[in-house]
Amino acid sequence: MKFTITLAQEQDGRWIAEIESLPGVLTYGATKGEAVAKVEALALRVLADRIENQQASHESIEFAYS
């Protein structure tokens, strides 16, 4: 699985990171790096839950950035 992380900076300086293909996987961070780390961790939690509940397989996981 390969997931694209979309990044944007808010007017107040915060960064938003989102993985649109995983509904609800959106995070904020004070820096771009913090937002990316948080969204990757959240995505892995969502995927782990899906695997545990047999809603997804445990294929290799990749992140790309846009």
Image (cartoon, rainbow, N blue to C red):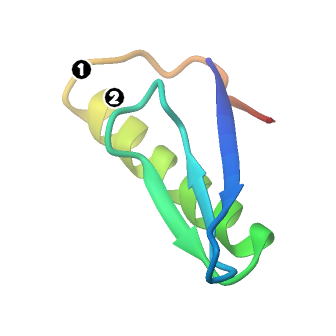
Quadrant of residue 65 within the rendered picture: top right
Image side of residue 38 versus residue 60, left or right = left
- Determine whether, in the image, residue 60 is placed left or right of residue 52: right
Most extreme residue toward the left is 53
Three-letter code for the amino acid on which mark 2 is drawn: Ile
Q: Horizontally, is 21 left or right of 56 in the view?
A: right
Return the x and y of residue 22 as percentages of the image width and height: 41, 31
The quarter in which the N terminus is drawn is top right
> In terms of depth relative to the viewer, which is nearer, 64 or 15?
15
The residue at the point 53 percent across, 37 percent down is: 19
State the mark number for residue 54.
1
Quadrant hosting residue 49: top left
- Nearer-the-camera pick, 28 or 53: 28
Q: Amino acid at mark 1?
A: Gln
User: Marks 2 and 1: CB-CB under 8 Å?
Assistant: yes
**Quadrant, the C terminus:** top right
**SS for dot 2:** helix
Number of the label disc, if any, that sits on residue 51: 2
Q: Residues within 10 Å of mark 2 (few under 14, many from 20)?
A: some
